[in-house]
């Protein structure tokens, strides 16, 4: 009779520790999954920001080339064209 009560007590303690261990590992797995998912989303956001920076830089370079193209016509400036048209140059 005493042995039976002691066995129940031991089983109860073992169940308690097993449940704690299982909870601990489940929490670790969930945290790992959530953090990896967060990292993937963060990488996507970081990549999008880098692409925006690159596109902005390319747009600025294109604007500079266009402004230079408007300023120069066939490798002459507007002033040179004017002086040549007048006949001074």
Image: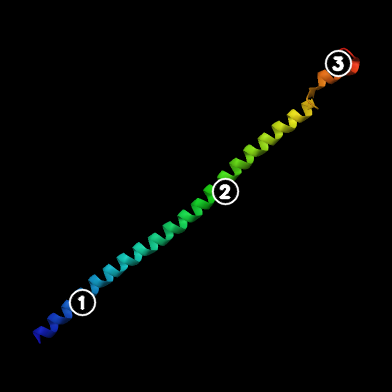
First in sequence, mark 3 or 2: give its number. 2
Question: Percent position (x, y) of residue 22?
Answer: 30, 70
Residue in the image at 63% along x and 42% along y:
55
Q: Is residue 64 above or below residue 78?
A: below
First in sequence, mark 1 or 3: give its number. 1
Q: Quadrant of residue 83?
A: top right
Q: Is residue 58 above or below residue 76?
A: below
Is 2 left or right of 53, judged from the image as shown? left
Q: Quadrant of the N terminus?
A: bottom left
Crowding at mark 3 (Cα within 10 Å: few <14, some 14-19, many 20+)? few
Is 1 left or right of 71, judged from the image as shown? left
Question: Percent position (x, y) of residue 52?
Answer: 60, 44
Residue at the left extreme, as displayed: 2
Q: Quadrant of residue 59?
A: top right
- Which mark, residue 83? 3
Q: CA distance from mark 3 to mark 2?
A: 50 Å
Of circles 2 and 1, which is in front?
2
Of circles 3 and 2, which is in front?
3
- Badge 1 is on which residue? 12
Is 36 left or right of 11, judged from the image as shown? right
Residue in the image at 34% along x and 67% along y:
26
Q: How is the image coloured?
A: rainbow
Q: Quadrant of the C terminus?
A: top right
- Which mark, residue 48? 2
Which residue is more in the foreground, 10 or 54?
54
């Amino acid at each position: 009779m005493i042995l039976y009560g002691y066995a129940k007590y031991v089983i109860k303690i073992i169940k308690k520790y097993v449940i704690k261990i299982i909870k601990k590992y489940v929490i670790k797995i969930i945290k790992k999954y959530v953090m990896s998912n967060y990292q993937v989303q963060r990488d996507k956001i970081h990549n999008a920001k880098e692409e925006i920076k690159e596109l902005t830089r390319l747009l600025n370079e294109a604007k500079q080339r266009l402004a230079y193209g408007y300023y120069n016509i066939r490798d002459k400036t507007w002033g040179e064209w004017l002086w040549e048209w007048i006949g001074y140059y």
